[in-house]
Image (cartoon, coloured by chain):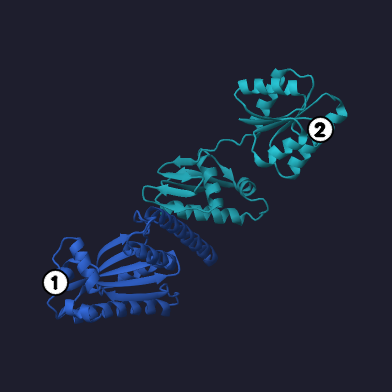
Amino acid sequence: MKLLYAEDELQLSMAVSEILKIKQYEVDSVFDGTAAWEKLQTNTYDAVILDIMMPGLSGIEVTQKMRENNIDTPVILLTAKNETEDRITGLTSGADDYLGKPFAMGELLARIAVLIRRTAKPLKPSILQTGNISLNCETYELKSDCGSLRLSNKESELLALFLQSDEKLITSKEILSKLWEDQTDENAVDLYISYLRNKLKQIHSNYNIQNEENGFSLQAE
Amino acid sequence: MNKEDYLFYGAYAPILEIAENTVLEQIDAILKKNVNEGVHNPAEYIISRVKSADSMKEKLVRKGMDTDVLSAIKQMNDTVGIRIVTHFIGDVYTISDYLKQSDAWTIEEIKDYISNPKPNGYRSLHIILKMPLHGSELDFLPVEIQIRTIAMDCWASLEHQLKYKKNIPNADLIATELKRCSDEIASTDLSMQTIREMLAK
């Protein structure tokens, strides 16, 4: 896990960085907001710790720049100014959490862990398997011992839903909202279900999608 | 057939040409009959050939067989070959059903490489017919009919180029990419067939 830590008080910076490293974090330490912003433009971090009061850009300004540039890495703001107004400004500028100085190191560590856990993308297995078929979610390859097909990304997402559904019902509404942002026509769902049914049949799958009331489920044939 | 082919096939050359034309005429008649009954013509185009002497000899050598003409005609199923190309995957099976129903020949074998593609990605439906030959010293001649979609045909022509090109530096990459193309084409063929069925409802 890689962290960016921006703090202009040298002693504090050294102490905190040292502890973070002991806790197995990889840490880039910088001492002002401008340097922090430069690092953020060229590196990817799992979380960012920013002091608010820094030379150059303030922690709040760095956060704002990050969000304006679609960098959505979680941010914890640190400051001596532990007042309600500052907390609100910090959080509305796009920060995820706020810690007032002086803070207990244990609390900072706990908050970093929470942020990383919350924002980490759920680990999706890249290959999903059911019956005699497997779907590679990265290459969209649908495979059985009788051949293979390359699905479109939407077909692959839809089949992944079914392969992870444990044969449970998935409603048309659920599919519509999970696969499309701006599609309201449920016929789209029916069409994509038909694509998948024909493609599963083509590779001699022993599982296929069955109609249920209000939706569909994947069942052994 | 060119001069070399006539030399190789000798007295059998006219028989092969008659067989080729007879099968073509029969297929044409079957398709026309169904079109007259109001069904759309499932065949986009049809091509045929008698296997060239060169490629016949190459194949016989590769299979460790004698390279004389009788050995070729008796043991090869594709001395006479016909390819029917369709727009949609459903049409492939419509034509296959027509051919099965005809009493102009008997069906020797059907190899469905659409349902069970070859490992390199080759997809096509192969039907081996036994075409009776009246008034010739051969009782019948096998004829290979390949039926596939335009997309599969396009893929096969590219793959054919790979097969006969020597010393390709990145052959593995090309083979992998061709396989991927075939799987994508097959997937799109199926999507288009699905849309077509939906429109026909």
Which of the two residues, B14 or B162, is positioned nearer the viewer here? B162
* x and y percentages locating residue A8 in the rendered image: 77, 27
* Residue B62 located left or right of residue A10: left
For the point 46% across and 62% down, the residue is B189
Above or below: residue A213 compared with residue A36: below
Is disc 2 in the same subunit as disc 1?
no
Colour blue maps to chain: B
Q: Are marks 2 and 1 in contact (CB under 8 Å)?
A: no
Q: Look at mark 1 in the image and give the residue it sits on.
A: B70
Residue type at tag 1: Leu
Above or below: residue B79 compared with residue A155: below
Numbered disc 2: secondary structure:
loop
For the point 56% across and 35% down, the residue is A123
For the point 54% across and 66% down, the residue is B199
Which of the two residues, A153 or A75, is positioned nearer the viewer here? A75
Above or below: residue B198 compared with residue B79: above
* Residue B97 located left or right of residue A136: left
* x and y percentages locating residue B194 in the rendered image: 50, 60
Q: The residue marked by circle 1 belongs to what chain?
A: B
Q: Which mark is residue B157?
A: none
- Mark nearest the camera among 2 and 1 is 2
Residue type at tag 2: Pro
Q: Which image quadrant for residue B61?
A: bottom left
* Residue A218 located left or right of residue A21: left
Numbered disc 1: secondary structure:
helix
Q: Residues within 10 Å of mark 2 (few under 14, many from 20)?
A: some
Q: Label 2 vs label 1: CA separation?
A: 93 Å
* x and y percentages locating residue B135 in the rendered image: 14, 81
Q: Which colour represents chain A?
A: cyan
Q: Look at mark 2 in the image and give the residue it sits on.
A: A55
Q: The residue marked by circle 2 belongs to what chain?
A: A
